[in-house]
Image (tube, coloured by chain):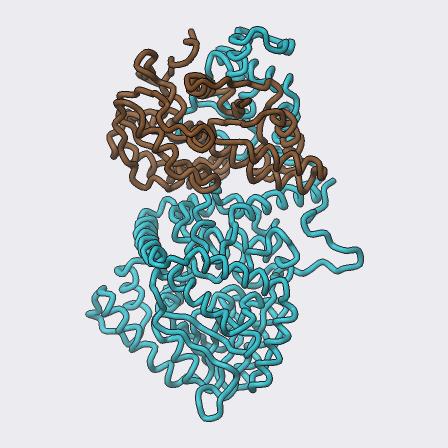
Amino acid sequence: MTAVRPSSPVLLGMPALPTSPRGTGHLRGDESFPDAARRSLTDTQLRRNLGKATRTIRGKRAAVVAELPDWEALREAGRQLKVHTMAHLPDYLVQLEEAVTARGGVVHWARDAEEANRIVVDLVRAAGADEVVKVKSMATQEIALNEALEAAGIAAFETDLAELIVQLGHDKPSHILVPAIHRNRAEIREIFLREMADVDPELSDEPAALAAAARRHLRRKFLSAKVAVSGANFAVAETGTLAVVESEGNGRMCLTLPETLITVMGIEKLVPRAQDLEVFLQLLPRSSTGERMNPYTSMWTGVTPGDGPQAFHLVLLDNGRTAVLSDAQGRDALNCIRCSACLNVCPVYERAGGHAYGSVYPGPIGAILSPQLTGIEDNASLPYASSLCGACYDVCPVKIDIPSILVHLRAEHTETYAAEHRVPSAEATAMAAAAWVMRNPTRWTLALRSGRLGRVLGRRRGVIGEVPLPVASQWTATRDLSRPPQQTFRDWWAAEHASAAPEPDGPGADGPGADGSEGAP
Amino acid sequence: MRIALFITCLADALFPDVGRATVTVLERLGHTVEFPRDQTCCGQMHVNTGYQEQALPLVQRFADTFAPYDAVVAPSGSCVGSVRHQHAVVAERFGSPLLQQQVASVAARTHELSELLVDVLGVTDVGAYFPHRVTYHPTCHSLRMLRVGDKPLRLLQAVQAIDLVELPGAEECCGFGGTFALKNVDTSSAMLADKMRHVSSTGAEICTAGDSSCLMHIGGGLSRLRAGAKTVHLAQILAATRERPMVLAPGGQEADVHAGPTAVA
């Protein structure tokens, strides 16, 4: 029997690395990708919103990327910096902790979502606050911090406009960068009218009017909140500097106005030196919003007396990341800088929408990251939520080979399943049977000729039902299958080249099945 | 140069005309094509579905079968992509160091049809004649795994009497993706619907590509919709001449092609 993780041999005596525990956070969906996608595919409004938004961002990205003659060199630099950082992650994390501490910050280490949430709740309580403002943070979405704060009687206010829309709509984000991408402005207007107590009832759905309403709504929170919670796009190990990259300035308000700042950051967000930011600050905005430069880049290092928050806490979140790091083939998923270029270019994401992925990390990067963070069997349908078209790999600013990792995770899934079940799946049986036939040219020739291949590939118009794969028969819901030919290529070749090697015994080209009669139910 | 044809399992079983057309084109250019009968399948279906170990004997067979040849040609960007990128993965995980060497050596000599014609044989005009309106879909693996670039288009542009029209959204996946079309049938169908809409918008009679699998998917959709346009493999267009034109069948998803060294009854 094949080992569960043959690509990442675990040494004897070494404990297995923990993945993100079940029951906490937002890394798992309630249903499989195909089931969730089926529902969103029927939502024509969602598909229109998504198609329009992704097409627009795709075009902008392509234009600004084309401006840079050294784009490929930048991508390679980004990739190498990330690969190097991951290879030395423990050292750089310790260096970061020392630098943050030396500048008056406090570093907390959280193994998982529950621990991180507990740390943040305790810090907010210690600050004597019952509300916090938040700047958009994937890490806090991942660990469901808002829900944990609410359970502790602490109100969390999202300040990123899109996050605010999601929060007020009692909705879930469906995109890494544009969490409310599935909403159009008419829907946003309705949400604001319903949820904002102080909104002008004559509010129009003009973007400027919607932004102004959100600004008025948020301003009071900025001025009153004593505690802010942020994520981080980057952390510089050598200086202990944290960086947030954003468009609206709301993040900067959170980072400068409150007395206490708590940053929750995945441990993979490190870069070794401040100089490395020059690479990522070029790669990120062009890949994400299609801008040459994002409007606001905020950086802070520890605390500065009399200026900005006087208490700074950094929560370093693992939540399955070291397990990802232990997989030599899959670990590149940690190199992601959350630009979402892969989402915007993915034909599957564009149709199925972000919610179909179940996790806060949707799209191609989510399809490789979520199953690794949770353990493959908790998100087993995600590595298959791709046609392997490769568009995501082409646009990734740090050159993550997403298609290859998807294929790698599919193997991990089938091998884990086989290790955990005595009876092979119907699919595994079919694949083994196909491989048994295909490994031998005589068997293969006979199978092709006699129509037995029909059991593998399907051969009659309207019928593919003998393939023991789930939903196999649905192929023909939207497509006709071609009629099988009178003669396989190899039989034609043999007839043409009669002096060739003797043919295997068996039914001839005119035998059963050559006319497509065999294999029909 | 000894050129071997790797037919691919799908073309062998369902689209033998594509293999015949490939032989026709190469023979017309003065090359002799050999067909090693020991070949079976590249194993892509197994690898892409998560059964890498089952693909090992297929990888071994491919390396053994094609080792003696200077060049291997396949009328499929997808299968060549598998040979070039996935065989190494399988050999590294489950194979011997010797197999790893064999795989690397054979992969370097394995070419998709347009690559062999343009890069290895140095031809863009293969003497074809095809008086039809055609649009070209660059399949994902040709486009992004193999980087065939504009080679297929250059071959098509050199075809006499062809009316080549650009396909909107050409670089977007048609939604096939092997077992993706089975496991995610709804999403796949939605992708296919957009591809068909784009094909229809060109007014082309024929949508062509370098992969029978994608064409089976697109053609199957067009046939179901009675959309008019049909799918024909690039090799079949390149094989057609004034003397042996391709006959477009009135029905069915794929045109019946009678161009080839021997017309099939």
Q: Is residue A116 left or right of residue B174?
A: right
Q: Is residue A381 above or below residue A72?
A: above
Position of residue A455 in the picture relative to residue A249 (left or right): right
Q: Which residue shows up at 59% across the image and 63% down it?
A: A84
Quarter of the figure with residue B261: top left
Does residue B176 sit above or below A120 in this rendering?
above
Q: Which chain gets the cyan colouring?
A: A
Image mark count: 0
Question: Relative to B168, is A200 above or below?
Answer: below
Assign the C terminus of chain B to one quadrant of the image. Answer: top left
Could you say which quadrant of the image residue B126 lies in? top left
Tell me residue A268's x, y (percent).
56, 65
Chain B display color: brown
Q: Nearer the viewer, residue B93 or B23?
A: B23
Q: Give the percent coordinates (x, y) of residue A60.
A: 31, 57
Give how far across and how far down residue B27 sits, in percent.
Answer: 45, 17
Is residue A476 visible in the rendered image? The answer is no
Of residues A128 and A480, the one nearer the viewer is: A480
Outermost bottom residue: A306
The residue drawn where x is 54% and y is 9% is A497
Quadrant of the image occupied by residue B67: top right
| Image spot of residue A220 (x, y percent) | 34, 82
Q: Is residue A357 something one can see in this rendering?
A: yes
